[in-house]
C-alpha cells in the first residue's frame, strides 16, 4: 500500500506542473547514510522536502531525514508529510 500511495502522490504532483506547461522541479534524495526524502521541490531558491506516508498519524520519525538538507549552501523551505490524516496538521514549525 505504501509504495502505491507514494507513487500516486508523486505522479499527481508532477502532472500538476506538466498541465501548467512547467518543467517539474522535483528531485529524490538518498545518501550513503540511508537518509531518504521521497520528494524535494525546488521553488524560489529553496528546497521543500516532502515525505509520503500511508498512515493517518505520522510521527516525527517521518521527517528525520529532512535534516540532510540543512547545509550552509542550501536553503530549506517548508516541508510536508502527505498522509491519510483527515485534517491538516503540523509536525513542526515548518512541516505540515
Image: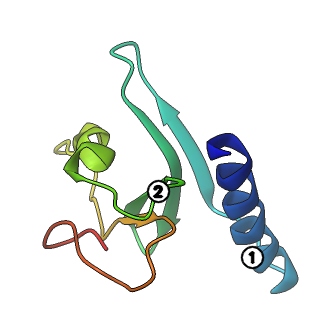
Q: Earlier in the sequence, mark 1 or mark 2?
A: 1
Q: What residue sits 51% from the left and 68% below the top?
A: 84
Residue 51 on image: x %, y %:
45, 53
Q: Is residue 40 above or below residue 46?
A: above
Q: In whole angstroms, how far apart are the C-alphas of marks 1 and 2?
A: 26 Å
Circles 1 and 2 in contact, beta carbons < 8 Å: no
The 10 Å Cα crowd at callout 1, few under 14, some 14 to 19, many 20 or more, is some
Name which quarter of the figure residue 2 lies in: top right
Taking depth in this image into account, of 58 and 43 the one nearest to the observer is: 58
The answer to whether residue 34 is left or right of residue 38 is left
| Kind of element beneath mark 1 | helix
Residue 45 on image: x %, y %:
39, 67
Q: Is residue 76 above or below residue 85?
A: above
Name the residue carrying label 1.
17
Quadrant of the drawing holding the C terminus: bottom left
Taking depth in this image into account, of 12 and 86 the one nearest to the observer is: 86
Amino acid at each position: 500500500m505504501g509504495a502505491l500511495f507514494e507513487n500516486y502522490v508523486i505522479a499527481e504532483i508532477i502532472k500538476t506542473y506538466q498541465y501548467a506547461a512547467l518543467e517539474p522541479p522535483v528531485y529524490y534524495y538518498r545518501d550513503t547514510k540511508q537518509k531518504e526524502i521521497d520528494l524535494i521541490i525546488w521553488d524560489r531558491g529553496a528546497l521543500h522536502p516532502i515525505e509520503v506516508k500511508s498512515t493517518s498519524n505520522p510521527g516525527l520519525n517521518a521527517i528525520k531525514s529532512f535534516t540532510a538538507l540543512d547545509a550552509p549552501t542550501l536553503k530549506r523551505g517548508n516541508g510536508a508529510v502527505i498522509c491519510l490524516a483527515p485534517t491538516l496538521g503540523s509536525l513542526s514549525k515548518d512541516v505540515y
